[in-house]
Image: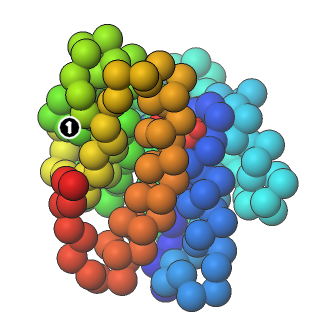
């Protein structure tokens, strides 16, 4: 059985939908823990409510990023984690973690990569006045939002959309897409890049 860990930094809505999906009896994986790099993250509260084990520590508590990531690796190894799901984890994955788990870290990004990389993707797409954006699930590599794309889904931006309605639409798509893609990946099914 594939063992999963989820990393989040803040709200944790994607963590929650993933945790609920993974906890279904027919899901071919187990969720071992949530890791947060913010001790105040609301995601930790969600984990407590769901009965999911969680760990939290912050980069600033370590002398450097390498030792911070070494502590994360210890956790991952102790729990024999096979696949890491980033869900609103707001740190760039550094070389220490990446070299140990290369090809085993995936992320969800609220835009149609390679467009609108970075931490403000929804705002950036809205401000750009494009008529569509979307959601991408991708592998993590050493760049920022540059890893191999696993799946994408388009979200239309209508003339009456506000930033708030767009955000809501994007999150709704994220919550459908991420659990589905993870299930397909683990089940060995080929995930389709569906731009529709
Ligand atoms: C999501 O939009 C995700 O795509 C991005 O960060 C956001 C996290 O939201 N990487 P939440 O914490 O899961 O609610």
Residue 81, image x and y in percent?
48, 66
Residue named by callout 1: 113
Q: Nearer the viewer, residue 128 or 110?
A: 128
Q: Quadrant of residue 18?
A: bottom right
Q: Ligand 1 within 8 A of label 1's CB? A: no
Q: Is residue 92 left or right of residue 143?
A: right
Crowding near the residue tagged with mark 1, few <14, some 14–19, many ≥20 C-alpha atoms within 10 Å: many
Question: Residue at 39% of width from left, 17% of height from top?
Answer: 123
Question: Residue at 66% of width from left, 66% of height from top?
Answer: 20
Question: Residue at 35% of width from left, 29% of height from top?
Answer: 158
Q: Which residue is the extreme one toward the top?
A: 127
**Taking 103 as reference, is 165 above or below it?**
above
Question: Residue at 69% of width from left, 41% of height from top?
Answer: 43
Q: Quadrant of residue 50?
A: bottom right
Residue 140, image x and y in percent?
27, 46
Q: Nearer the viewer, residue 75 or 31?
A: 31
**Taking 32 as reference, is 129 above or below it?**
above
């Amino acid at each position: 059985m594939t063992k999963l860990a989820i990393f989040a930094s803040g709200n944790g809505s994607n963590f929650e939908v993933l945790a609920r999906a993974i906890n279904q009896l027919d899901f071919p994986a187990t969720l071992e823990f949530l890791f947060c790099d913010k001790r105040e993250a609301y995601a930790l509260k969600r984990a407590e409510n769901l009965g999911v084990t969680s760990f939290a520590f912050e980069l600033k508590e370590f002398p450097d990023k390498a030792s911070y990531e070494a502590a994360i690796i210890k956790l991952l190894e102790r729990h024999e984690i096979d696949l890491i799901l980033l869900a609103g984890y707001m740190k760039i994955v550094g070389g220490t973690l990446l070299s140990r788990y290369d090809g085993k870290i995936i992320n969800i990004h609220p835009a149609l990569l390679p467009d609108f990389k970075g931490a403000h993707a929804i705002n950036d797409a809205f401000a750009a006045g494009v008529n569509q954006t979307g959601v991408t699930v991708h592998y993590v590599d050493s760049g920022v939002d540059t890893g191999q794309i696993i799946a994408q889904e388009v979200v239309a931006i209508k003339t009456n959309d506000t930033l708030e309605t767009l955000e809501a639409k994007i999150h709704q798509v994220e919550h459908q897409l991420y659990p589905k893609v993870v299930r397909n990946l683990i089940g060995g099914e080929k995930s389709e890049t569906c731009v529709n």
